[in-house]
Structures are given as structure tokens and as C-alpha cells.
């Protein structure tokens, strides 16, 4: 996704290939059969910060043929979830700070011009996780709102429902319902009555076909889509290191495995929504991680380096030393990281199916 760390660097753990779902050990995918190209665990351990273990769910487990929590195709209902609430909670503050507020005014204008249901406008949040998008967006919009939270993990849906906001920016009521399951065969009918579709960190774990399906469904329903925090393939670390670019390149290749869009997702989504008649706006939404976000930075580093080594096992020995040095700098408050993302707002032409 290796030399042995010193005792001062804490408990040892294998570099995870994007730390995995709840119930797995801190090595991510160690209890599953290694993915193609995964580094052999016998290559050696990797340091964790003192007293720290890798949070289960610190990113998707991207084995060939797998997807993240939400899919736009049929999936095995017994397949374990890809995210844990600990990781989603850890990243929520950075996500909220990163989302692009510049997209809110055009979204507000579009929503204000849509026919309004008696109980307010209806928002479908795809892959809601613990509900961070609702907590961020609902209090920034005026008017009564009904949020339909979609996720395949009932545990996450519970967190999302309990933690959802109860009032809009103007004090209007916000209500919530949850729907368990994958977003399979998404169609305009599935979005009947929708005023808005939202998602976070979703586009980059979809295929081109799945993004086109999403765009077509939004266009058919005549509802806008606010799709935030898609990776764009750029990371800035300060101070720099000669291995930064090589790790980034390997990570980006890992994100594209199995036909996934990874850092190409925003470009492909812009084209797909535009082809379906939508007006598309894009704004940067970078994570800016400094000493105050050191715990998140450390977990992100493990997943980022782990995915790169899974893609290019020949990096393992150098990546071991690189990760140990980066974690030490992070713990000392000396590391700053910018993880670049983009937010996309697609304004579909209103239709009779919009509400």
C-alpha cells in the first residue's frame, strides 16, 4: 500500500492499504488475502505514533472490484462496510473547513426558484456516513428541509440520524429519514420529488459509467447536485521530501485501479453533467492540515503511503523510512499538508419531476 522503528516511535504496525472497515486489525487488510501488488507483510513493520493505532476506516479499502460505502450498481448485501465512524468523525472538521462556500449562493438561488413542497425541499444525501454533509449544509440553507440519508451501513445511519441538525438557517424545521442499501440502478424515478442531491468524497470512487448514471438521474429529476471533496491528485507537504512526488504518483495510480476515476473524477463529472444539460461550477476545497490536525494528518499519511506501496511494492523499503520520518515530524508539529480536492455544483434544468 521497511526497517524497524525505534521503541520511541511506538507500537509497530504494517503499512495499511487504506485502513479498512471496523473489526479488522490496525493493519487494515491484513486479515484478508493480499491484493494484487500488495507488499508482503514480512517486509517489516512501520511505526505508529506513541499510543496510536490506525483508525479502522481511514479511507476506502480499494481492492480490485470493490467500491466504497455507496455504489451505483448491485452489490453483495453481506459485504462489510468500508468506513468506520471513528475515521469519519476524525475528518469532519477538516471537511467542513474545506467545502467551498462560493457554491452556496448559486445553489440557494436555484432552490429558491424550485416549486416548494409543503414540508420544504427534499435532499438526498448519497453515502451519508455519519451525516457530516447535513450538519454542514442544512444550517446554511433557508427553509424547511427533509433529508433522506442513504448508506449501506445501519450503524452509520444511526449516527447520522441522531446527529442531524433540527433547524435551517432561518429556524425552519429540518426532518430526516434514513434508507439503508446501495444506491443501485439509480434512476430519475429513484429521485422523484428531489430538490437536491448531495454527496461527499464519492465521485473519486466511482467509474465513468457510474458518474454518467448519476448525472443522468439528476438531469431526469431536474435537481441540482452538490458533490464535495473529490480528490484531484495533488498533495503539498511542507517541508518537502524527494519521495513526495513518487508517493503521490503511486497513490493516484492506486486510486484509478479497477476503472475507478480517482483524481480524474471531477473532470469526468463535469463532462457528464454538461452532456446532460447541466450548468457546472467547480471550486477548490483543500484540506489544510497543520499542528492542530496532527491526528488526522497521521492517519491520512498511513493510508496515503499504504495505498502507494500497495500499488508499487518496490517502494516499500523507502516508504517505511519516509512514513516514520513524516509521522515524527507530524507528532512534533513540524509538518503541514495540503490535500487538494474540488467541490462541484451541477445545476440541472428544472423539470416537472423537481420539487
Image: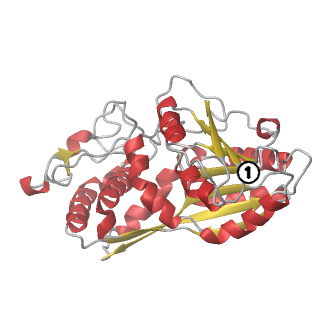
What percent of the width, then of the height, locates residue 235? Answer: 44, 68
Q: Residue at x 46, y 44 (%)?
A: 60
**Residue position for label 1:** 196
What percent of the width, then of the height, locates residue 284? Answer: 58, 70
Would residue 68 be seen by someone viewing this image from the given angle?
no
**Front in this rendered view, residue 107 or 232:** 107
Outermost residue to the bottom: 239
What percent of the width, then of the height, locates residue 229? Answer: 55, 59
**Front in this rendered view, residue 175 or 71:** 175
Picture quadrant of residue 194: top right
Q: Is residue 288 left or right of residue 68?
A: left
Q: Is residue 218 left or right of residue 289?
A: right
**Front in this rendered view, residue 109 or 98:** 109
Q: Is residue 72 left or right of residue 95?
A: right
Q: Residue at x 78, y 58 (%)?
A: 111
Quick one: SS at disc 1?
Answer: strand
Circle 1 packing at 10 Å, graded few (<14), some (14-19), many (20+), is many
Amino acid at each position: 500500500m521497511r526497517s524497524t522503528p525505534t521503541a520511541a516511535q511506538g507500537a509497530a504496525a504494517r503499512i495499511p492499504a487504506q485502513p479498512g472497515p471496523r473489526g479488522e486489525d490496525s493493519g487494515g487488510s491484513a486479515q484478508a488475502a493480499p491484493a494484487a501488488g500488495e507488499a508482503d507483510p514480512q517486509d517489516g513493520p512501520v511505526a505508529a505514533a506513541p499510543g496510536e493505532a490506525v483508525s479502522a476506516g481511514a479511507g476506502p479499502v480499494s481492492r480490485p472490484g470493490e467500491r466504497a460505502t455507496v455504489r451505483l450498481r448491485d452489490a453483495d448485501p453481506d459485504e462489510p462496510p468500508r468506513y468506520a465512524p471513528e475515521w469519519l468523525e476524525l475528518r469532519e472538521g477538516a471537511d467542513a473547513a474545506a467545502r467551498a462556500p462560493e457554491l452556496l449562493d448559486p445553489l440557494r438561488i436555484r432552490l429558491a426558484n424550485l416549486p416548494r413542497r409543503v414540508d420544504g425541499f427534499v435532499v438526498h444525501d448519497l453515502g451519508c456516513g455519519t451525516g457530516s454533509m447535513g450538519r454542514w449544509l442544512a444550517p446554511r440553507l433557508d427553509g424547511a428541509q427533509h433529508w433522506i440519508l442513504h448508506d449501506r451501513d445501519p450503524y452509520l445511519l444511526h449516527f447520522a440520524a441522531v446527529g442531524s441538525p433540527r433547524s435551517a438557517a432561518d429556524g425552519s424545521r429540518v426532518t430526516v429519514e434514513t434508507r439503508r442499501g446501495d444506491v443501485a440502478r439509480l434512476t430519475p424515478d429513484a429521485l422523484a420529488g428531489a430538490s437536491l442531491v448531495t454527496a461527499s468524497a464519492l465521485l473519486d470512487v466511482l467509474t465513468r459509467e457510474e458518474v454518467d448514471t448519476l448525472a443522468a438521474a439528476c438531469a431526469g429529476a431536474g435537481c441540482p447536485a452538490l458533490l464535495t471533496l473529490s480528490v484531484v491528485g495533488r498533495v503539498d507537504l511542507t517541508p518537502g521530501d524527494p519521495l513526495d512526488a513518487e508517493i503521490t504518483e503511486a497513490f493516484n495510480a492506486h486510486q484509478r485501479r479497477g476503472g475507478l476515476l480517482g483524481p480524474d473524477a471531477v473532470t469526468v463529472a463535469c463532462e457528464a453533467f454538461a452532456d446532460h444539460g447541466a450548468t457546472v461550477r467547480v471550486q477548490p476545497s483543500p484540506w489544510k492540515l497543520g499542528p492542530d490536525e496532527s491526528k488526522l494528518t497521521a492517519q491520512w499519511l498511513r493510508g496515503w503511503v499504504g495505498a502507494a506501496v500497495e500499488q508499487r511494492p518496490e517502494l516499500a523499503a523507502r516508504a517505511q523510512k519516509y512514513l516514520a520520518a513524516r509521522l515524527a515530524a507530524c507528532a512534533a508539529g513540524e509538518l503541514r499538508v495540503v490535500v487538494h480536492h474540488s467541490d462541484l455544483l451541477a445545476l440541472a434544468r428544472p423539470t416537472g419531476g423537481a420539487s
